[in-house]
Amino acid sequence: MGRMDPDELLAALDPEQREVALASRGAVCVLAGAGTGKTRAITHRIAYAVATGMVNPAHVLALTFTVRAAGELRGRLRALGGGAETVRAATFHSAALRQLSYFWPKVIGGRPPKLVESKLPLLREAARDLGLSVAGGALAEAVTEIEWAKVCQPHPDSYVFAAAAAGRAPAAGVEEVGRLYQAYEALRRDRQLIDFESVLELTAAILLTEPVVAREVHGAFRYFTVDEFQDVNPLQKLLLDAWLGGRAELCVVGDPQQTIYSFTGATSEYLRGFAADFPGAAVVRLVRDYRSTPQVVAAANRLTAGGAGGVAGLAIAESSGALVAQRPSGPDPALTRYPDEEAEAAGVAAEAAALIKRSVPASEIAILLRINAHMERFERALADAQVPYVVRGAERFYDRPEVRQALVLIRGAARAEGAHTDASGLPGELPAAVRHVLASAGLTVAPPAARGAVRERWESLAAIAGLAEGLAASRPGATLAEFAAELAERAETGHAPVAAAVTLATMHAAKGLEWDAVLIPGLVEGIMPIVHARTAEAIEEERRLLYVAVTRARIRLALSWAPARTPGQGGRAGGETARQRSRFLAVVFPSMSAAVKESTVKGNTVKGNT
């Protein structure tokens, strides 16, 4: 691919993005608000440095946190070309695993340990060995606790003290989790296994203790970019410092207002203190919001202005971090008060149905919830309203067991097709052939009546069948082998299929995504902020989480709450005390009385007056 014109690269950027691109060398901190084009800015910065000959693309390492984000970086760099397409864009874990696998035989000897992708099986075994009876939910929470401990680096023997100091309160209790952590680590080491945290830790250890390895890695990678820097945890920072080796060729991009993973060990302190760590670093703020309407942006700005922390405390030049909308005007955000949770679920489902009737694609509508426990109620309401929906979790699409199975089946069918065998009896057209193959994995014509895991499995298989239909429409005559190759490429880049259905997701799982219409129900005290958010710092994280949810909306934003859990409990005699609306609603809607619609729901019909 030919060399890109540096002037053309700059011409495609706004003034602040251009400032990022022109800061081609040295330490750079980009404070990028939601929807401000941060990926565009950092990919053009890399491409500009390559186009001007300032850096060799083979020496660039662009790091992010998810396979999907790494795939997007690679796709953008590939589109820019001029050598930028050869830049390595990867997650922290994939980059570390590649280096660990390469250096292990040279430094340690023998084959690298096997990677354990899930801690649950070993943890169950550890619980049995200890004679502990730990429920499934508590065991899953113990996994989170162990991962927090491993990234924050207290030794297993010190977990109880460290967890107490950090205010951790796992359901199983810190003492039991401490015992589980020690037993898990003993099992893992005895069987010569590594987990994802071990990959980072061991790679950093080899770099810090083996000068020959450090010289080789420092020679290979000389120019670093880290996306979502507010989500870096101490272990990732340790590895990043080992990769840098005291150099300052580092561009970080992040937004303190989107720090929502503190419970995992992530901290925005590294972003806030970047200028102190790298004196003379260039600091650029991206504030032009290209995603959302002025009305949505104004709501988001009120949330950030109403926070106790905001961006105060950043050891950088202070200036306003308020977003400036670039899109045309749209409808005002709506706030609805429903009498109870059942009415709220039915009303939100009816609103989604109404949007679809008004020609908003179902795939451009999302319902974002604070907690997973509320999913079933909204699944039921959407099914009753005959609104197609998909449940999106934190788990990556291509990591789901049913998706892995489907990919194996499709590759096998493609090989059989290539060998001209007809043992499978596949239909001739690609979509029909794929559906035939996936039928053995559980794909049916109609979605199952069951919800939860059964429904999610069907959705995954149906999404793959939908990809086959899309490929056949764009490339008539496409073969199973071509479809298998496309699936493999999508899996590598984390490019999950988009279903023609409303997305039902938690606020955390929505990070990095966007829709035309976003509906956010359940905004009551005890849910938003969550009941266990008792400190000022925890309340701030809840506010930031709502900010992330609000800024997912491009055009329409609807928020709602209900004082009662069930019908007839709205604070009347004999019923439960009415719940209070979220404190954050008064910030988003300063004139609360003028904004609230009192609604009642009958079946799928919402009646209300402003």
Image: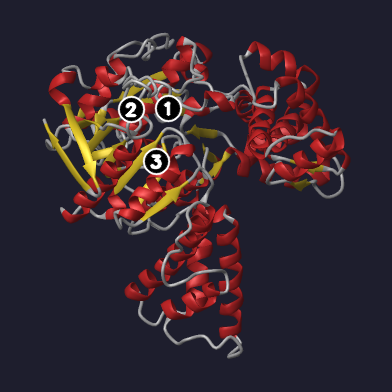
- Locate the N terminus by quadrant: bottom left
> Coloring scheme of the render?
secondary structure
What is the three-letter code of the residue carrying label 2?
Answer: Gly
Picture quadrant of residue 172: top right
Q: Is residue 104 left or right of residue 460?
A: right
The disc at residue 64 is: none
In the rendered picture of this protein, how many numbered marks are placed on residues? Answer: 3
Q: Earlier in the sequence, mark 2 or mark 3?
A: 2
Query: In the image, what residue type sits under mark 3?
Result: Thr
Instruction: From the viewer's perspective, tell me whether residue 470 is left or right of residue 259.
Output: left
Q: Residue at x 83, y 32 (%)?
A: 183
Give me the residue at 42% from left, 32% from top: 370
Is label 2 in a helix, a strand or a loop? loop
Rounded to the nearest whole Å, what is the CA distance between mark 2 and mark 3? 17 Å
The location of residue 149, given as percent across then percent down, is 68, 25
Mark 1, Cα crowd under 10 Å, few <14 / some 14-19 / many 20+, is: many
Tell me the SS state at disc 3: helix
Using the image, determine if residue 175 lies above or below residue 187.
above
Mark 1 lies on residue: 254
Q: Pick the quarter of the image with the C terminus.
A: top left
Residue that mark 3 sits on: 43
